[in-house]
């Protein structure tokens, strides 16, 4: 019985936690991503070496080179050499 209660509590705790995509800028220059979430566009500006979390429920991201990618909220966007890669 206790195993079932503990398992259910662990499942609920994990289900309640939110995941978000993250972006890291490995370039020496500041880079900007355009994030479209729920129909609203916003700019995510990352200074050199900066990391940010965004897009907890999925979104579209326009990369520095103009490519548009769909994110689910669990990816890492790594910017290096002016190019963004999803990992």
Image: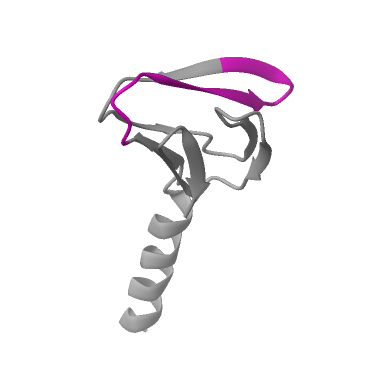
From the viewer's perspective, tell me whether residue 67 is left or right of residue 30. right
Give the residue drawn at x 65%, y 28%: 66
Quadrant of residue 78 within the rendered picture: top left
Q: Total marks drawn?
A: 0
For the point 66% across and 25% down, which residue is it?
36
Along the line of sight, which residue is nearer the eye, 53 or 19? 53
Q: Is residue 53 above or below residue 19?
A: above
User: What is the residue that sits farthest to the left in this orientation?
Assistant: 49
| Boundaries of the magenta span | 26-42
Q: Position of residue 67 (x, y in %)?
A: 67, 35
Return the x and y of residue 60 as percentages of the image width and height: 66, 34
Quadrant position of residue 31: top left
Residue located 28% across and 28% down the image? 50
Residue 19 location (% of width, % of height) = 45, 46
Nearer to the camera, 81 or 48: 81
Within the magenta stretch, is there residue 27?
yes
Considering every residue shown, the one lying at the far front of the view is 81
Q: Is residue 38 magenta?
A: yes
Q: Quadrant of residue 1?
A: bottom left
């Amino acid at each position: 019985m206790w195993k079932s209660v503990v398992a259910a509590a662990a499942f609920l705790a994990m289900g309640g936690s939110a995941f978000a995509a993250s972006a890291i800028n490995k370039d020496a220059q500041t880079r900007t991503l355009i994030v479209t979430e729920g129909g609203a566009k916003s700019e995510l500006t990352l200074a050199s070496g900066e990391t940010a979390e965004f897009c907890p429920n999925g979104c579209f991201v326009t990369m520095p080179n103009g490519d548009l990618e769909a994110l689910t909220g669990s990816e890492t966007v790594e910017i290096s050499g002016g190019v963004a890669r999803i990992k």
